Amino acid sequence: MNDLLTNKINKIKEEYKNNKYVFIPQKIVIDLIKQLGATEKDIDTLIEYGDYLAQDPTLSFRHSRTGRYLFDNEAKTISRLEYQPFVLTEEDGFIREDSGAQRHFRAIDDRWQSNTAYQALLKLKMLLIEGNRFTPRRLTDQQSPKSISTVFHLRLIAEPNSLSELSIEGVHKDGVDHTMIVMMNKNNVKNNSGALRVHSPQEAIGTPWQDINPNNVLYEHNNAQYLDILLIADNELNHSGTPIFTHDNHHSAYQDFIVLLSRYPTVNTHPSHQFDSTQLHPDLPLTLHLNKQVA
């Protein structure tokens, strides 16, 4: 990386280290991902990929796709990993009726992987979390130079005169070390709905959005723009989202996100270890080299 890019990323990393969360606005994100290889064409195209998502396996009002990647800080590479079911437990800070259940999502495919803006977001996440250590997740290998990142592209849909919950589980954690939420497309979303919130640990896991104590809200982001980013130290702080409402009640609304969940590999005694494979994907191979950025 060139010195200017390194300095910009280090400044963000320092704020993240100090506050345990950091917001990165659209303008800065676009500048960073262009330096990491994103083209204007692919930036303009990525916003449309929410139209290619599949019905979510657990939530009727959500569409989704997912993919798993290995961030290797020694080799300076990002590689696509084989498909695994996704599992979050109550011990991970996720309290919902499907806690502990295996969830099977449709895969992110080559449409995403060939997009340089998507590739650059993967690189940016890896660079932002490298060397930033917080309270360790239980039963993970904190000495590993590698981390596993599960990426979700999500669309939340609200019908007229109803709401769509960004997080029906209320205040929660994602069971990882670092959660990065990237705002994507949205349509007909009412202003000041669909907000993202960061909470202090004093806000109990499972608290519904309407019962949250304002004194425990460390940060709230409303009316997000395409490629705005919120990065959270998941084992330090909690987070949630407010419901999406329609602006024009004659039409449905939707809001899209890409969420990148990263943590160290699990040890053998972790309850989800069997779903923590580091084998490469046999059908959707991808390897990105961080030393090949566009300066």
Image (cartoon, helix red, strand yellow):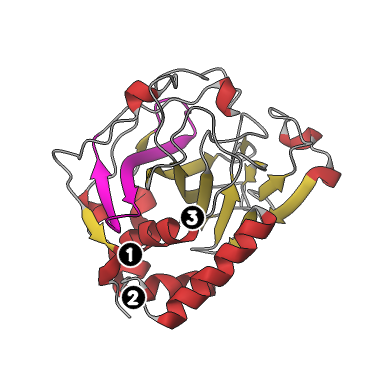
Crowding at mark 3 (Cα within 10 Å: few <14, some 14-19, many 20+): many
Q: Residue 40 got which mark?
A: 2
Q: Residue at x 29, y 31 (%)?
A: 277
Q: Which residue is mark 1?
A: 45
Crowding at mark 2 (Cα within 10 Å: few <14, some 14-19, many 20+): few
Crowding at mark 1 (Cα within 10 Å: few <14, some 14-19, many 20+): few
Q: Residue at x 34, y 30 (%)?
A: 276
Quadrant position of residue 241: top right
Residue 76 visible in the current orientation: yes
Mark 2 lies on a secondary structure that is: helix
Find the distance from the CA under tag 1 to the CA under tag 3: 26 Å
The residue range painted magenta reads: 56-82
Mark 1 lies on a secondary structure that is: helix
- 146, 239: nearer the viewer: 146
Looking at the rendered image, the quarter that the C terminus falls into is bottom left
Mark 3 lies on a secondary structure that is: helix
Q: Position of residue 278 (x, y in %)?
A: 27, 36
Find the distance from the CA under tag 3 to the CA under tag 2: 25 Å
- Is residue 106 toward the left or the right of residue 213 in the image? left
Looking at the rendered structure, the kind of residue marked 2 is: Glu
Q: Position of residue 115 (x, y in %)?
A: 27, 61
Q: Residue 129 got which mark?
A: 3
Mark closer to the chain start, 1 or 3: 1
Find the distance from the CA under tag 2 to the CA under tag 1: 9 Å
Asked whether residue 70 is drawn in magenta, I would say yes
